[in-house]
Image: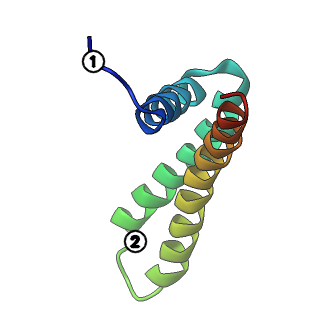
Amino acid sequence: MESYTIEQDFDQFCLARIEGICESDRDHGAFQEKSKCYYQLRDQLEELWNPEINAYLDALEKYQVEAFLYIYRIAFKEGLHFLQNQ
């Protein structure tokens, strides 16, 4: 039988939570909205490749960062809770 360390347990916990967050009804809406904005802006960039693109690039980066921060914030908070219960 393979033994697991607390780090491996924590890694598995975080991975499971990120997958759960993406599939969760409660949290899915906020992530979907950020993802939708990301892909809409990306599509606009493909159609409007010109010097004014910088404003779109800034907005695209903002939505992408917000989407990832949303996932990491929840996973980190729940990870701390997991470690406190060890």
Q: How many marks?
A: 2
Q: Earlier in the sequence, mark 2 or mark 1?
A: 1
Figure check: 23 above or below 59:
above
Figure check: 58 above or below 14:
below
Nearer-the-camera pick, 35 or 1: 1
* Image quarter hosting the N terminus: top left
Q: Amino acid at mark 1?
A: Glu
- Residue 59 left/right relative to 42: right
- Residue 24 left/right relative to 3: right
What is the distance, in whole Å, between disc 2 and disc 1 at their CAs?
54 Å
The part of the image, by quadrant, that contains residue 75 is top right
Which numbered dot is residue 2?
1
The part of the image, by quadrant, that contains residue 76 is top right
Coordinates of residue 6 in the picture (x, y in percent): 48, 34
Coordinates of residue 35 in the picture (x, y in percent): 54, 45
Q: Amino acid at mark 2?
A: Leu
Q: Residues within 10 Å of mark 1 (few under 14, many from 20)?
A: few
Which residue is found at the position 50% from the left and 35% from the top? 10
Nearer-the-camera pick, 71 or 37: 71
**Which residue carries the number 2 mark?**
48
User: What kind of element bears circle 2?
Assistant: loop
- Between label 2 and label 1, give the one nearer the viewer: 1
**Residue with the most extreme left position:** 1
- Residue 30 left/right relative to 39: right
Figure check: 10 above or below 43:
above
Residues under numbered marks 2 and 1 in contact, where contact means CB atoms less than 8 Å apart = no
